[in-house]
Image: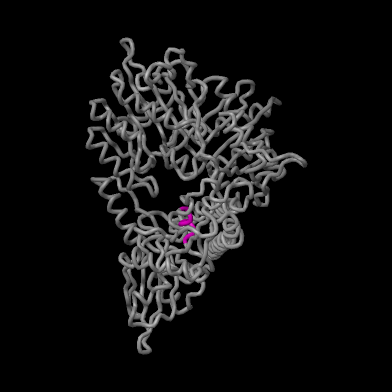
Amino acid sequence: MFDRELSWVAFNRRLTYEVARPHQPALTRLTKLAQAAASLDEYFMVRMPLLKGDVLGKEAIALRGDRLSRLQSYLRTLMERQQAHFAGNLKPYLARQGIHLLAYERLTTPQKRYCQARFEDEVMPVLTAWITQPDAATPDFSNLRLNLMVWLERVGKKKIAWVKLPRVLSRFMTFRGTSHPTEWIVVPLEQVIAAHLSSLFPDDVVKGCYAFRVTRSTDLGVLDSETANLMDMIQEGLQQRQQQGRPVRLEVAVAMPHWLRSHLARQLTRAPIDLYPLKGWLGLSDLKELTRLPRPDLLPPPWQPGLPMALKPQPAPSMLSFVALSAVPMDNLFNEIVQQDILLHFPYHSFAHTVERFVAQAAVDDQVLTIKMTLYRTAVDAPIVRSLIGAAKAGKEVVVLVELTAPLDEAINIHWAKRLEQAGAHVVYGVVGFRTHTNLVLVARREAHRIQQYAYLGTGDYLPDRPQPYEDLGLLTSRPDIATDLSHLFNFLTGCSHHIGYQTLMVAPDQLKHRLQELIQREVDYAQQGRPARLIVKLNLLADPDIIESLYAASQAGVEIDLIVRSICRLRPGIPGLSDRIRVYSLLGQFVEHSRILYCQNGDAPEAWIGTADWTPRGLNERIEVMVPLSTPTLVTDIHTLLQTLLADTQNSWQLYPSGQYIPRQPPPDTAGQSAQQIFQQRS
């Protein structure tokens, strides 16, 4: 199998390469570079501490010797490649579009005067500087914040000063140019500060000023089953992360003298290999700020999602044109769901008018008795959670499992957990030792002297307004077998029962992996009978050794297998006698391909499953995950059509070869490239 870490490096390299694709608007390319850099930041925060064995209370993966050095060398090259894309490709391209990203020294004299005035009015009042002797301890540098290390001298004596860029200010100083109304000038704030250091240190001689950036571990330690208050422990861990997270990477300006680099590394207890000198601007993830510049012509047209066919309104009678809009009642979503299962495809379908509307209607419907929901990630302003708060205040039984340990979203989840508890909802925090990664809603409604249950099962989070939208699937259903399984699952999650066998759903950790291997083996059996056998799988990550062995065996038995794996893939395709019937693609584009799908030929009765689980040891053994089958041939056909459209993509798709190299797919000669995401937009 491919090395997991190097497979991730290859994924980030593809993200970086996407920046150079010419068919995208300028600010879209800038967004992609910022996201590739942010992905690299997160890798260092989350993964590197494990690889270095530098974690508290956890069993580290701990790469040793040459493997760790080789990985850090690859990461160093990756960071340099991002800098090269930015300096040599993106900055000149943006300049041709009227957005000039300039070093301070390249400004004209009037522009420098303007920056000086803004420095004195906006920046100077909120700056704080520290001066230390060369052998003194450094201040505490926040994670991923830019800082300046200033070399001062007074009467021949060296001193070191430290300036933190204030969080309350933007990373870049922007102002309009003079040659055209749409022209913008962008200057890094650290360079503006560096040009006016004499205002901060009037009694010293500034010998040099150098930017640096510290990346810290985000590890919160082990969640102990004996902990009395899980929320208190996580809040304490968050505070420690913000203040004392262990440094794992030190980015410095390449011009920083070696004695200053050594001093900084020593103060932060980092080895020389943890230093990453860079020629360009540090913190490329901060470039996302510039996507808010008022240049809509450099962004894709705003996407207006539609509705699935089952929810599209019928033509209204002409008399309704005389009725005020506020007097027209909303269609009852429950009436639509009880008639048929509804498959949702985001962002092509509207999240607000489907999932948010489903929960909002349940919250105000007098016949709804109970709403149960799992909450893995959500936004600072979350309409779904506000609906749950309203339902709890109205006296409905509201049960919410809030996953407090969702990486980097713990603070938001703690906020909503407290608000829900204050409103009267019953809030639980999941099963100790397992992260609850599902996205489920179960609604119980009184109808005609009986209780009818409705459910939503999604492959993604409740985050519809990400800077780069996520592609995901969801299912609205009233099937009794699914409702029964979900009732048992919620009882398990709230501590009321042990794991049991589920009649319809596949649930991790106890059942899912075994069931997946059974479905793969079923295709093997068909192939050995000489019947057509095929699997199509769409995932974010494929890294579980046992599942990969099962796929290898299926390939050798004659099963045709197409895998669409966005990021890490440890399976090595195309090896004669082992995996020659397996093809692996990675699809990147305007939207993040996030849904997980399994399609099985199953003889003459194809099946399709959607869910939250990636095929990794963590996803199959250490998380609560759910996959749900689609019930009707129509929905299975819809999934097959979706997958075939993705497999036909020749604009945003890469193919993985046995060597480990990903090569962009090309359309046939004299044929335009085909984008699956554009086709989905047109169809919706």
Residue shown at the point (35%, 33%) measured from the top left? 384
Front residue of 373 and 328: 328
Region rendered in magenta: 283-288
> Is the residue 212 above or below the residue 680 in the image?
below
Position of 527 with respect to 37 (left or right) is: right
Q: Residue 215: image x %, image y %?
A: 42, 61
Residue shown at the point (58%, 46%) measured from the top left? 569
Position of 681 with respect to 394 (left or right) is: right
- Give residue 435's quadrant in the image: top left
Q: Residue 354: image x %, image y %?
A: 43, 28
Front residue of 672 and 405: 672
Q: Residue 539: image x %, image y %?
A: 54, 39
- Give residue 388's quadrant in the image: top left
673 in magenta: no
286 in magenta: yes
Position of 589 with respect to 225 (left or right) is: right
Front residue of 52 and 369: 369
Kindly give the residue lying farthest to the top in the view shown: 448
> Is the residue 683 above or below the residue 82 in the image?
above
Which color mode does the image show? one colour
Q: Is residue 522 visible?
A: no
Front residue of 46 and 32: 32
Q: Tell me which secondary structure the magenta stretch mostly adopts.
A: helix
Residue shown at the point (51%, 53%) measured from the top left? 181
Viewport quadrant of the C terminus: top right
Q: Is residue 498 visible?
A: yes
